[in-house]
Image (cartoon, grey):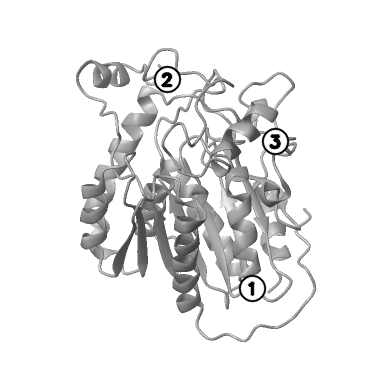
Protein backbone atom coordinates (compact mmCIF):
# COMPACT_ATOMS: atom_id res chain seq x y z
CA UNK A 1 0.00 0.00 0.00
CA UNK A 2 1.29 3.43 -0.90
CA UNK A 3 2.89 5.32 1.98
CA UNK A 4 0.83 8.33 0.95
CA UNK A 5 -2.03 6.72 2.87
CA UNK A 6 -0.01 6.80 6.06
CA UNK A 7 0.77 10.45 5.57
CA UNK A 8 -2.85 11.21 4.75
CA UNK A 9 -3.84 9.54 7.98
CA UNK A 10 -1.45 11.75 9.88
CA UNK A 11 -3.42 14.78 8.72
CA UNK A 12 -5.92 13.88 11.42
CA UNK A 13 -3.18 14.34 13.99
CA UNK A 14 -1.46 17.45 12.67
CA UNK A 15 -0.73 20.01 15.30
CA UNK A 16 -1.46 23.68 15.04
CA UNK A 17 1.74 25.70 14.96
CA UNK A 18 0.63 28.16 17.60
CA UNK A 19 0.47 31.90 17.46
CA UNK A 20 3.20 34.27 16.46
CA UNK A 21 5.75 34.81 19.17
CA UNK A 22 4.97 31.53 20.93
CA UNK A 23 8.46 30.33 21.81
CA UNK A 24 7.17 26.81 22.48
CA UNK A 25 5.58 26.34 19.05
CA UNK A 26 6.86 23.58 16.76
CA UNK A 27 9.24 24.37 13.93
CA UNK A 28 9.13 22.46 10.65
CA UNK A 29 11.10 23.71 7.66
CA UNK A 30 14.80 24.28 8.30
CA UNK A 31 17.37 26.10 6.19
CA UNK A 32 20.57 24.41 5.10
CA UNK A 33 23.70 25.64 6.89
CA UNK A 34 26.06 27.17 4.30
CA UNK A 35 29.06 25.22 5.61
CA UNK A 36 27.51 21.77 5.10
CA UNK A 37 28.02 19.82 1.88
CA UNK A 38 25.28 17.90 0.00
CA UNK A 39 25.89 14.60 1.81
CA UNK A 40 24.41 16.21 4.94
CA UNK A 41 21.34 17.63 3.20
CA UNK A 42 17.86 16.12 3.33
CA UNK A 43 17.28 12.92 1.34
CA UNK A 44 15.51 13.18 -1.99
CA UNK A 45 11.76 13.48 -1.50
CA UNK A 46 12.05 14.30 2.21
CA UNK A 47 8.78 15.59 3.74
CA UNK A 48 8.11 17.15 7.14
CA UNK A 49 5.03 16.83 9.28
CA UNK A 50 3.73 17.31 12.82
CA UNK A 51 2.16 14.58 14.92
CA UNK A 52 -0.06 15.46 17.87
CA UNK A 53 -1.52 12.85 20.18
CA UNK A 54 -4.10 14.12 22.66
CA UNK A 55 -2.93 17.10 24.67
CA UNK A 56 0.77 16.30 24.23
CA UNK A 57 3.08 18.77 22.48
CA UNK A 58 3.18 18.42 18.70
CA UNK A 59 6.12 16.28 17.61
CA UNK A 60 8.04 16.93 14.40
CA UNK A 61 8.74 14.01 12.09
CA UNK A 62 10.22 13.57 8.63
CA UNK A 63 9.99 10.81 6.05
CA UNK A 64 11.67 9.76 2.81
CA UNK A 65 11.41 6.63 0.71
CA UNK A 66 12.99 4.81 -2.22
CA UNK A 67 12.55 4.58 -5.97
CA UNK A 68 11.54 0.95 -5.54
CA UNK A 69 9.03 -0.82 -3.34
CA UNK A 70 10.56 -0.48 0.16
CA UNK A 71 11.71 -3.65 1.86
CA UNK A 72 11.07 -2.20 5.32
CA UNK A 73 10.06 0.97 7.11
CA UNK A 74 12.57 2.22 9.68
CA UNK A 75 11.44 4.65 12.37
CA UNK A 76 14.38 6.48 13.97
CA UNK A 77 14.00 8.00 17.44
CA UNK A 78 16.61 10.70 18.05
CA UNK A 79 18.85 11.20 21.07
CA UNK A 80 18.92 14.11 23.52
CA UNK A 81 19.27 17.51 21.86
CA UNK A 82 19.26 16.04 18.36
CA UNK A 83 17.11 17.13 15.48
CA UNK A 84 16.21 14.91 12.53
CA UNK A 85 18.75 16.84 10.44
CA UNK A 86 21.58 15.00 12.21
CA UNK A 87 20.23 11.80 10.63
CA UNK A 88 19.92 13.04 7.04
CA UNK A 89 23.09 11.29 5.84
CA UNK A 90 22.04 8.01 7.47
CA UNK A 91 18.49 8.31 6.12
CA UNK A 92 19.88 8.73 2.60
CA UNK A 93 22.12 5.68 3.06
CA UNK A 94 19.17 3.59 4.25
CA UNK A 95 16.97 4.82 1.38
CA UNK A 96 19.64 3.61 -1.04
CA UNK A 97 19.49 0.19 0.60
CA UNK A 98 15.78 -0.04 -0.14
CA UNK A 99 14.16 1.21 3.07
CA UNK A 100 11.69 3.97 3.84
CA UNK A 101 12.96 6.09 6.70
CA UNK A 102 10.99 8.06 9.26
CA UNK A 103 12.58 10.23 11.96
CA UNK A 104 10.54 11.29 14.98
CA UNK A 105 11.77 13.94 17.40
CA UNK A 106 10.55 13.64 20.96
CA UNK A 107 8.33 16.24 22.60
CA UNK A 108 10.40 19.19 23.74
CA UNK A 109 13.31 18.27 21.45
CA UNK A 110 14.54 19.39 18.03
CA UNK A 111 11.75 21.08 16.10
CA UNK A 112 8.97 19.65 18.27
CA UNK A 113 6.76 21.79 20.48
CA UNK A 114 8.23 22.63 23.87
CA UNK A 115 6.83 21.89 27.30
CA UNK A 116 8.43 25.00 28.78
CA UNK A 117 10.58 28.05 28.12
CA UNK A 118 13.34 28.93 27.50
CA UNK A 119 13.16 27.02 24.23
CA UNK A 120 16.67 25.60 24.48
CA UNK A 121 15.94 23.94 27.83
CA UNK A 122 15.56 20.18 27.42
CA UNK A 123 12.50 19.62 29.57
CA UNK A 124 10.00 16.76 29.72
CA UNK A 125 7.86 16.01 32.81
CA UNK A 126 7.58 12.37 31.66
CA UNK A 127 8.15 10.25 28.54
CA UNK A 128 4.61 8.90 28.29
CA UNK A 129 3.80 11.38 25.52
CA UNK A 130 6.77 10.13 23.50
CA UNK A 131 5.80 6.50 24.01
CA UNK A 132 2.22 7.16 22.89
CA UNK A 133 3.48 8.99 19.81
CA UNK A 134 5.70 6.04 18.84
CA UNK A 135 2.82 3.62 19.30
CA UNK A 136 0.50 5.81 17.22
CA UNK A 137 2.96 6.31 14.38
CA UNK A 138 4.09 2.68 14.16
CA UNK A 139 0.48 1.48 14.09
CA UNK A 140 -0.34 3.84 11.24
CA UNK A 141 2.80 2.77 9.37
CA UNK A 142 1.89 -0.89 9.80
CA UNK A 143 -1.73 -0.34 8.77
CA UNK A 144 -0.75 1.58 5.64
CA UNK A 145 1.75 -1.04 4.45
CA UNK A 146 0.93 -4.34 6.20
CA UNK A 147 3.34 -6.33 4.00
CA UNK A 148 6.29 -4.07 4.89
CA UNK A 149 7.90 -4.69 8.30
CA UNK A 150 8.27 -1.79 10.71
CA UNK A 151 11.67 -1.54 12.42
CA UNK A 152 12.31 0.77 15.38
CA UNK A 153 15.78 2.32 15.65
CA UNK A 154 16.31 4.22 18.88
CA UNK A 155 19.45 6.21 19.58
CA UNK A 156 20.54 7.11 23.11
CA UNK A 157 17.43 8.01 25.15
CA UNK A 158 15.48 7.29 21.98
CA UNK A 159 16.45 3.67 22.62
CA UNK A 160 14.87 3.83 26.08
CA UNK A 161 11.65 5.18 24.58
CA UNK A 162 11.75 2.50 21.86
CA UNK A 163 11.96 -0.32 24.42
CA UNK A 164 9.10 1.17 26.44
CA UNK A 165 6.95 1.51 23.31
CA UNK A 166 7.57 -2.11 22.28
CA UNK A 167 6.71 -3.29 25.79
CA UNK A 168 3.42 -1.40 25.46
CA UNK A 169 2.49 -2.94 22.13
CA UNK A 170 4.09 -0.86 19.38
CA UNK A 171 3.91 -3.15 16.30
CA UNK A 172 7.64 -3.35 15.52
CA UNK A 173 9.02 -6.48 13.88
CA UNK A 174 12.55 -5.52 14.85
CA UNK A 175 14.20 -3.30 17.44
CA UNK A 176 17.61 -1.67 16.95
CA UNK A 177 19.17 0.14 19.91
CA UNK A 178 22.11 2.35 18.93
CA UNK A 179 24.14 3.44 21.97
CA UNK A 180 20.98 3.27 24.11
CA UNK A 181 20.88 5.18 27.40
CA UNK A 182 19.12 3.22 30.11
CA UNK A 183 20.24 5.38 33.03
CA UNK A 184 20.63 9.11 33.62
CA UNK A 185 24.25 10.25 33.69
CA UNK A 186 23.30 12.76 36.41
CA UNK A 187 21.06 11.03 39.00
CA UNK A 188 18.26 13.14 40.43
CA UNK A 189 18.35 12.42 44.15
CA UNK A 190 18.56 14.28 47.42
CA UNK A 191 17.85 18.00 47.05
CA UNK A 192 17.29 17.65 43.29
CA UNK A 193 14.64 15.00 43.81
CA UNK A 194 12.96 17.23 46.39
CA UNK A 195 12.81 20.09 43.88
CA UNK A 196 11.17 17.84 41.27
CA UNK A 197 8.68 16.55 43.84
CA UNK A 198 7.87 20.15 44.76
CA UNK A 199 6.91 20.87 41.16
CA UNK A 200 10.15 22.59 40.19
CA UNK A 201 11.23 20.05 37.58
CA UNK A 202 11.54 22.81 34.97
CA UNK A 203 14.66 24.11 36.66
CA UNK A 204 17.83 23.46 34.64
CA UNK A 205 19.96 20.66 36.03
CA UNK A 206 23.04 22.89 35.78
CA UNK A 207 23.59 26.64 35.70
CA UNK A 208 24.75 28.31 32.49
CA UNK A 209 23.61 25.29 30.49
CA UNK A 210 21.88 27.18 27.70
CA UNK A 211 22.79 26.75 24.04
CA UNK A 212 25.82 28.65 22.76
CA UNK A 213 27.24 28.97 19.25
CA UNK A 214 30.64 28.74 20.94
CA UNK A 215 29.73 25.49 22.62
CA UNK A 216 31.55 22.24 21.77
CA UNK A 217 30.66 20.37 18.62
CA UNK A 218 30.30 16.59 18.53
CA UNK A 219 34.04 16.02 18.25
CA UNK A 220 34.95 18.33 21.12
CA UNK A 221 32.16 16.86 23.26
CA UNK A 222 33.49 13.36 22.73
CA UNK A 223 30.39 12.14 20.90
CA UNK A 224 32.27 11.17 17.73
CA UNK A 225 35.80 10.89 16.40
CA UNK A 226 34.88 12.33 13.00
CA UNK A 227 35.72 16.06 12.66
CA UNK A 228 33.25 16.65 9.81
CA UNK A 229 30.25 14.75 11.09
CA UNK A 230 30.95 16.21 14.50
CA UNK A 231 30.04 19.66 13.14
CA UNK A 232 26.65 18.66 11.74
CA UNK A 233 24.31 19.20 14.70
CA UNK A 234 25.89 22.49 15.77
CA UNK A 235 25.76 23.75 12.18
CA UNK A 236 22.02 23.06 11.87
CA UNK A 237 21.34 24.68 15.24
CA UNK A 238 23.40 27.74 14.39
CA UNK A 239 21.49 28.25 11.14
CA UNK A 240 18.08 27.46 12.72
CA UNK A 241 17.59 29.01 16.17
CA UNK A 242 14.39 27.03 16.81
CA UNK A 243 16.40 23.78 16.80
CA UNK A 244 18.82 24.86 19.51
CA UNK A 245 19.11 22.73 22.62
CA UNK A 246 21.10 23.37 25.76
CA UNK A 247 21.25 21.24 28.88
CA UNK A 248 18.40 19.20 30.40
CA UNK A 249 16.06 20.12 33.22
CA UNK A 250 15.79 18.30 36.51
CA UNK A 251 12.44 16.95 35.33
CA UNK A 252 13.97 15.52 32.16
CA UNK A 253 16.64 13.67 34.15
CA UNK A 254 13.98 12.39 36.53
CA UNK A 255 11.96 11.16 33.55
CA UNK A 256 14.94 9.13 32.29
CA UNK A 257 15.27 7.49 35.69
CA UNK A 258 11.54 6.82 36.01
CA UNK A 259 11.27 5.29 32.53
CA UNK A 260 14.40 3.19 33.08
CA UNK A 261 12.81 1.71 36.19
CA UNK A 262 9.45 1.27 34.50
CA UNK A 263 10.77 -0.91 31.66
CA UNK A 264 12.59 -3.38 33.91
CA UNK A 265 9.64 -5.67 34.84
CA UNK A 266 8.58 -6.14 31.21
CA UNK A 267 11.94 -6.85 29.58
CA UNK A 268 11.63 -10.63 29.81
CA UNK A 269 8.35 -10.47 27.92
CA UNK A 270 9.87 -8.63 24.93
CA UNK A 271 9.94 -11.20 22.12
CA UNK A 272 10.80 -8.71 19.38
CA UNK A 273 14.15 -9.57 17.71
CA UNK A 274 16.55 -6.91 18.93
CA UNK A 275 20.04 -5.68 18.10
CA UNK A 276 21.97 -3.51 20.55
CA UNK A 277 24.84 -1.60 18.93
CA UNK A 278 27.31 -0.24 21.47
CA UNK A 279 30.31 2.05 21.14
CA UNK A 280 33.38 0.57 22.75
CA UNK A 281 34.60 4.05 23.74
CA UNK A 282 31.18 5.47 24.67
CA UNK A 283 31.48 7.43 27.91
CA UNK A 284 27.97 8.88 27.76
CA UNK A 285 26.09 5.77 28.84
CA UNK A 286 26.17 3.03 31.44
CA UNK A 287 27.61 0.09 29.50
CA UNK A 288 26.70 -2.35 32.27
CA UNK A 289 23.06 -1.25 32.06
CA UNK A 290 23.11 -1.86 28.30
CA UNK A 291 24.28 -5.42 28.83
CA UNK A 292 21.73 -6.09 31.54
CA UNK A 293 18.83 -4.90 29.39
CA UNK A 294 19.95 -6.92 26.37
CA UNK A 295 20.43 -10.10 28.44
CA UNK A 296 16.98 -9.66 29.98
CA UNK A 297 15.27 -9.60 26.58
CA UNK A 298 14.57 -12.96 25.00
CA UNK A 299 15.96 -12.26 21.51
CA UNK A 300 18.56 -9.53 21.90
CA UNK A 301 22.08 -9.60 20.48
CA UNK A 302 24.75 -7.09 21.49
CA UNK A 303 27.39 -5.94 19.02
CA UNK A 304 30.18 -3.58 20.09
CA UNK A 305 32.33 -1.36 17.87
CA UNK A 306 35.87 -0.85 19.12
CA UNK A 307 36.67 2.84 19.33
CA UNK A 308 33.09 3.87 18.67
CA UNK A 309 31.72 6.74 20.72
CA UNK A 310 28.16 7.71 21.54
CA UNK A 311 26.97 9.07 18.18
CA UNK A 312 27.68 5.99 16.05
CA UNK A 313 25.67 7.48 13.16
CA UNK A 314 28.13 10.39 13.09
CA UNK A 315 31.30 8.37 13.59
CA UNK A 316 34.24 8.12 11.21
CA UNK A 317 33.81 5.74 8.28
CA UNK A 318 35.87 2.93 9.85
CA UNK A 319 33.20 2.64 12.57
CA UNK A 320 30.10 4.01 10.90
CA UNK A 321 30.48 1.67 7.91
CA UNK A 322 30.29 -1.56 9.98
CA UNK A 323 27.55 0.02 12.13
CA UNK A 324 25.47 0.73 9.03
CA UNK A 325 26.19 -2.75 7.66
CA UNK A 326 24.97 -4.31 10.91
CA UNK A 327 21.71 -2.36 10.66
CA UNK A 328 21.27 -3.35 7.02
CA UNK A 329 21.87 -7.04 7.75
CA UNK A 330 19.42 -7.02 10.67
CA UNK A 331 16.68 -5.22 8.73
CA UNK A 332 17.18 -7.41 5.66
CA UNK A 333 16.76 -10.51 7.80
CA UNK A 334 13.52 -9.16 9.22
CA UNK A 335 12.29 -8.17 5.75
CA UNK A 336 12.92 -11.66 4.38
CA UNK A 337 13.23 -12.44 0.70
CA UNK A 338 10.55 -10.09 -0.65
CA UNK A 339 10.85 -9.23 -4.36
CA UNK A 340 11.99 -5.69 -5.15
CA UNK A 341 9.60 -4.09 -7.63
CA UNK A 342 10.68 -1.00 -9.53
CA UNK A 343 8.15 1.78 -9.20
CA UNK A 344 7.79 5.56 -9.23
CA UNK A 345 9.20 7.72 -6.47
CA UNK A 346 6.86 8.08 -3.50
CA UNK A 347 5.16 11.44 -3.19
CA UNK A 348 5.28 12.35 0.50
CA UNK A 349 3.51 15.65 0.05
CA UNK A 350 0.85 16.38 2.63
**Which of labels 2 and 3 is toward the front?**
2
The disc label shown at residue 196, or none? none
Q: Is residue 171 visible?
A: no
Numbered disc 1: secondary structure: loop
Q: Earlier in the sequence, mark 2 or mark 3?
A: 3
Residue positioned most to the top: 207
Residue 185 figure quarter: top left
Report the Cα–Cα distance between label 2 and label 1: 42 Å
Say if 278 sits above or below 20 in the image. Answer: below
Please state which of residues 314 and 56 is positioned toward the viewer in this rendering.
314
Quarter residue 71 falls in: bottom right
Which residue is denoted by mark 1 in the rendering? 70
Q: CA distance from mark 2 to mark 3?
A: 24 Å
Residue 140 in sight here:
yes
Question: Element at badge 3?
Answer: loop
Q: Are marks 1 and 3 in contact (CB under 8 Å)?
A: no
Give the labeled residue for mark 3.
16
State the mark number for residue 202. 2
> Spatial distance from mark 1 to mark 3, Cα to Cα?
31 Å
Q: Residue at x 57, y 22 (%)?
A: 119
Horizontally, residue 80 falls left or right of residue 183, namely right
The residue closer to the viewer here, 350 or 236, is 236
Q: Residue at x 74, y 81 (%)?
A: 342
Q: Nearer the viewer, residue 166 or 155?
A: 155
Give percent across and percent down for residue 144.
Answer: 63, 68
Please give left or right for residue 264 compared with residue 228 in the image: left
Which label's residue is closer to the chain start, 1 or 3? Answer: 3
Q: How many numbered marks appear?
A: 3
With respect to residue 55, does 280 lie above or below? below
Name the residue at 28% across, 21% down.
197
Asked if marks 2 and 1 touch (Cβ < 8 Å), the reply is no
Closer to us: 300 or 55: 300
Amino acid sequence: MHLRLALAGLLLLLAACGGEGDGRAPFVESRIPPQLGPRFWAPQGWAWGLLKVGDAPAQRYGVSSTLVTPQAQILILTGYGESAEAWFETATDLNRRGYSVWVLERAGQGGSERYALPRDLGHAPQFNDDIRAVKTLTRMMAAAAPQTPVILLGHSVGGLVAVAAVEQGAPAEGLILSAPAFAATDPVDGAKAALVKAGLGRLPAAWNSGWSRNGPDGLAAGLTGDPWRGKVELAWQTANPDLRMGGPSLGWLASVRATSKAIQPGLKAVETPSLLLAGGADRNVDRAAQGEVCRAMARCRLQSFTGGRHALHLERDAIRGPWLAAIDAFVRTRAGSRPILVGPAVDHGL
